[in-house]
Structure formats: C-alpha cells, structure tokens
Image (cartoon, grey):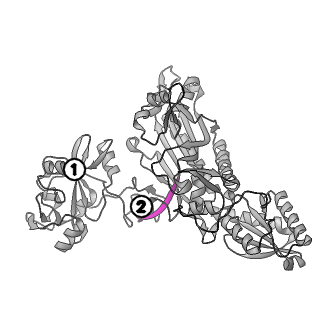
Amino acid sequence: MRMSKLLIPTLKEDPADAEVVSHKLMLRAGMIRKLTAGIYSYLPLGCRSLRKVEQIVREEMDAAGAQEVFLPMVQPSELWKESGRWDLYGAELLRFKDRHDRECCLGPTHEEVITDLVRRDVRSYRDLPLNLYQIQTKFRDEIRPRFGLMRGREFMMKDGYSFDATEEGAEEAYRTMWDAYSKVFARCGLKFRAVEADSGPIGGSFSHEFMVLAQTGEDTIVSCDSCSYAANMEKAETRPCEPAEAQVESAPKKVSTPGMSTVEQVSQFLRVSPEQLIKTMILSSENGPVAVLIRGDHDLSPVKVKNYLKVADIELADQRVIEEVTGGPLGFSGPVGLDRVTILADHAVRGISSAVVGGNEKDVHLVDVNPAAAFRVDHYGDFRSAVEGDPCPRCEGKLILTKGIEVGHVFKLGVKYSEAMNAKFLDAEGQERPMIMGCYGIGVSRTIAAAIEQNHDEDGIIFPPPLAPFTAIVTPVGAKSSEIDLAAEQVYRDLWAAGMDTLLDDRDERPGVKFKDADLIGIPFRITIGKKALAQGKVELRNRKKKEIELVEISKIADVVKEELEKWASEVRS
Ligand SMILES: [Zn+2]
C-alpha cells in the first residue's frame, strides 16, 4: 500500500460543520466524507478500520456459537404490523411504497425479519437453541443527525438474536453474549464498562449497555469506587436511608414566600439548605395524576417512577391538573393535606427531620414539617437519579459518575416478538410454546468513533493497534536517494512479511508534512528512514501514543515492532 496511490485526502483545518472530535478527525484524516445529512462514505482508511472491527466481532460471535446470516434491508410493512411496531415506531422508521403500492421500510433493526425467518423452519425444541447474527447497514431517520458516525442516519451494526426453549437457556445465551461482548471490546483495545441498563417492564438485570469511557460521552455511567457495580443513569439504584429523628413536635407553620417557586429561590429566601426542601411534583400518566416527593437537591427519575407505576408514559402535569389536585398554583405544591392523589416519596425524604414544603396556595410554603407525622405517603421508594458520592447499593463504597459512549447492548426480549408473531415450537411433551428471545447489538461504525473520542491528542487520532487502518507506516525522508528508497522498500516488505499491514509514504513531500499526516491518521508505529541513521545501519521507530523514538537496527525492525505490539496488548489486558 503506497500512499502516493491511495485516496487519503487529509485536511489541515478542522471542518466547520464538525462538532465532536471523532467527526473532525475522521474528516481530517480522510477516512470519511459526508454524502448528505447523517450519511457518510468510507474512504480506504475508514473502510480498513471498519473491516477490522467487523472481523473482531465476527470472530468472537463465531467463537461463542452464533451463526452469521445476512438479512434484507428493505422490509415489508406486514411484519411490522404483526409485531405492532408499524404504528409504535416513530418517524425514525423510514417508510415508503414500492411501484406496486406496497408499504415497506428500511430496517433500523431486524427483530421482525429474524422472527419470521425462524418461525418458518424451526418447529421443535430439538432445533433450539439458535443464535443468529449479521453485520449490516441500518437506517434510522434521526431528526437531527450529528456528530458524524456517532449519530448518523445510516450506520453499520452487528445485530444478533437468540432463540431458546427454556428460561435457563435464554439466560445462558445472555451470559454467553455478555462474555463475547467483553472480549470484543477488550480486543479492540478500548477502556469500557458493561453497565446495567433500564430494561423497562422486564426487570431484573437482563439488559446491559457496553460503554466506551470518554470524557466527551453523551451518557452518564454510575459506578462504584470499590466494587464492580455499574449502571446507566436511568437504572442506577440509590440506597434507602434511615428515617431522621423527629426534631419537630409542633404542627407545620405557614410562611409567606412571595413569587418564590423554585428550590433555589425558596432556600435562599428562607436561608435553609436545598436538602431541607421537599419538592412535590405532580405527574400525569395514562392512569391519572400522581404526586412524587423528592429532596430539594435531588432530581426526579421519570424512568423509575414509570417502572414502579407500570405505565407507558409519564410527564409533568399541566397547570390545570396541578390546580385540580392541589388547589394551588404551579410552584407551590406540597404534600400536607393532599388527599386527592397517590403520594410516592423518594427514600431520602424520610431522612429530612424538619422540612420546607409547598403550601398549596400562592406565595405560601410550610416550615417545620416532619415527614413522619405531617403528611401521608403511600409508598417510599427509589425515585431519584443517583448523584456523585451516594452510597453504593451493593457495598460500602461510594458512587462515582463518568461519561461514556454506548457501543453495545445486550437485552433479554422474552416472548414479546415470538408471541406477537406466533414463533412457536413443540417442547418435549408435545406442548406448543413461544420461543424465548434475546437481542444483541454492536454499533460497528460507532465503535470507531468512540475509539477516537477515547484516544486522540492535539495532533490527531491515536488508534489502538487493532483498529488502526494500518499498523505501521514507513517514512523515507531527506533528499531522494536510491539508498534510502531501497532501505524503505526493504523495511516495508519485512513488515508485511511479518504479518503487519504497513503503509509506505512514498510521496514527494517534506518530512514535516509526512509526519503530520501519519500522526493525524493515528498509525501506531512510524518507521523513519533517514540518511544519518541509515549510515549506521539503523532506522527510527516512533510510537504514536508514547511519542518515544528509538533507533533500531534495520534487520531487526519487524521483530521490534512485533514486540511493541505484544507489549501494548499486555498493557491493555492488565
Ligand atoms: Zn460497591
């Protein structure tokens, strides 16, 4: 692979429309180009990295006993109507009609297609378990595609589906995929965590997200500083706290709080800390309104409330509902005397001894409120988002918050699709049962973007070697001479012969330009061939990540690069 022949259009300046690091650097390194909003072409370098991720994924899926298939991207609406998702899936599903006026969509995911495939040919428990996967282009019509490959409309994904006859089998399939995913991301050389994710009405810990740790990540990961507990923000549990000793025997007192409706305003005005306030939030769901009490400095977790109430949707109630329920205006709701609605309270509310609450009338709050005596709570539970420093729900450690990028998801589906689409089998007793399914996704193109978000510096990308478009680059420098060219050619051949994919920068460019491009593209090892070192039979080896240069005998260069690669792998493993 000679650089003079390859299409590698590097850019000196940051492209104006790129917001995140990976997007900027992939454009600048000539890896991708935008065709239209959220849709990208992969140039030779981008394509090589993509194929490397795919290959790692493929090898680990095959090793775990999954079988590769390839499913159509265009899907008929009938299947989506059977599963009920034709109406439920929003505008992200790109729908269109063919020339015969038949409704179709571009697949954002393949649960329907795979369930249809399996139900046709699998009839008996003897044919199960089955685990099928594919690596394929998906389309999701994001309203605001941004961040390059991080949130594109068209993207490359590995999606896999397991079918089992028993619950135990389904759980084993889940664990097998969990292990395989851990191996995939470890082999990619990425720092990642598998975190418990919200699995909605299924419950249990049968949904994990694999997150690449990066400061620029969009998702917050909650993890323990001393045990292996990790969860995403929606799922992260908080520990119940002990009820506070009641300090107040007297009844709550009314105070005037003119125009003070936020926690900040009220706590400043009354000179109390936000931890002493109780926010009373009136929420609406399809089952009517509910009041949720949250400590002033905490944030409500709508997902936790939704899961507890087992409702599909929940939102802040509007002014009219608030007035109906509390008798007072927005911003002054409180739990005292609130008898028309179910009251849920977060555990932390119990820990407040003398609280400030809304008075259910304009410009009025109540102080000296004892949660144990002054109002009714129908259920105490975990209804808030975790915060840094919260006690770990599993051990004596403390929770810390970090940022991550979701690159994989394993999920136990159960019988949602097999029941809706009649994917049934006969068990050993001849009973007909729905197959128990799991689904497993890896964002293949997103993994490259996440790798760059995690590994870069001011000069460009620092690819972990397994994902780099090339492992090494040979860079002859200085005045053109047949001696230097011959040596470069020799090193280039030696590296390929030793199994390392290598690029030869044979362009007629200044050394500075060649070095800058090699750094920008993020090739892990650069071998510079210059006159001075060559006179002693040596070449320069530079490690992109460590920025260290060593002189190596020209005949040993392939062995030394190999050793460096092994060193890298053992550092990543530890
Ligand atoms: Zn812990």
Return the residue nearer the eye: 231 or 519: 519
Q: Residues within 10 Å of mark 1 (few under 14, many from 20)?
A: few
Q: Residues within 10 Å of mark 2 (few under 14, many from 20)?
A: few
| Residue drawn at (70%, 67%) of the image | 517
x and y, in percent, of residue 147 in the image: 52, 57
| Disc number for residue 318 | 1
Which residue range is magenta in the image? 392-406
Return the residue nearer the eye: 354 or 535: 535
Residue 415 visible in this rendered orientation of the protein? no
Q: Residue furthest front?
A: 99
Q: Secondary structure at mark 1?
A: loop
| Residue drawn at (13%, 58%) of the image | 373
The mark that comes first in sequence, 2 or 1, is 1
Look at the numbered disc 2 and say if its residue's Cβ is closer than 8 Å to ligand 1. yes
Return the residue nearer the eye: 141 or 251: 141
Residue 286 quadrant: top left
Position of residue 561 relative to residue 146, above or below, is below
| Residue holding disc 2 | 395
> In front of the other: label 2 or label 1?
1
On the rendered image, what quadrant is the N terminus found in? bottom right
x and y, in percent, of residue 70 in the image: 63, 36
